[in-house]
Amino acid sequence: MPKYRNIEKSRSSSGFIASVSPLPYGRGRGWVSRGWAFVFTLIILIACQKADELYYRGALVSFTYTYTNTVPELNAALGSMGEFCTIRMDGQNFIFSNLKTTTTRPLTAADTRVHPALGLAGLIVGLPNIPDVGADVSRVTAFDLACPCYDDYDTPRNLQLQPGGFAYCSRCQRTYNLNSQGIVAEGQPGRSLYRYRITYNAFGNTVSITN
């Protein structure tokens, strides 16, 4: 009979010989599965964090408008690449403007009940002719009408739409590219325009913007 019957042995700190038991079948595989689950969860969390960083949370935005097809400026901005319009509110009316025309629509009783809010100074809405990084198609985008050079001690400085899908700030003299995620196109380097979440139902002619 062989002197040692179990070739899988290890020596303990006390000097005794102890057999090494193999892992039960499938146990190692379970650890691997849990490891991959952790990796996938981490990737999802990082992706969500980056998505959250895309949108500005420093101002209240709550805007929903139905029958967008009845407002020429808004309808063009939502359906035509490279077109943009501004949305402002004077307390009694929504004011929609592009480079050529302006349309005013009174707030309805339903609008008043939900207390619409348009960020720091209003909104810029449009359909960029350049998709976001990683996207295959362009989607409608919403920016704040206030330049990011604003801070808590200033009055928000409204941007001015310019031909070709740009917006200009007379205070910091930066020009922003609305077709390219609101990045600085001319002037001193700086952060991109403040951006908000937007959904558009073309069949229901309804747009909703939130933060």
Image: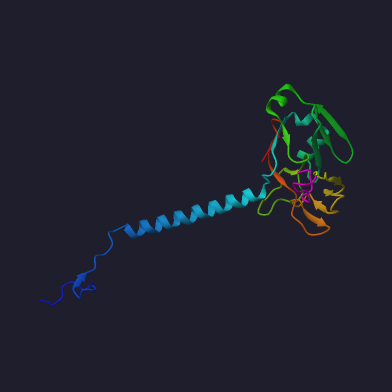
Task: Say whether residue 147 is magenta.
Answer: yes
The extreme right residue here reads 100
Q: Please count the marks in the image.
A: 0
Query: Is 87 positioned to the left or the right of 56 in the image?
Result: right
Asked if 174 appears above or below 91 in the picture, the reply is below
Q: Is residue 124 above or below residue 91?
A: below
Q: How is the image coloured?
A: rainbow
Instruction: Read off the magenta span.
Output: 144-154
Q: Position of residue 85 (x, y in %)?
A: 81, 40
* Residue reaching furthest to the front: 153
Quarter of image, res 27: bottom left
Q: Is residue 35 above or below residue 108?
A: below
- Report the quarter where the C terminus lies: top right
Q: Nearer the viewer, residue 2 or 209?
A: 209
Quadrant of residue 8 in the image?
bottom left
19 up-or-down from 148: above or below: below
- Residue 111 screen position, x and y as percent: 72, 26
* Percent x, y of residue 31: 37, 58
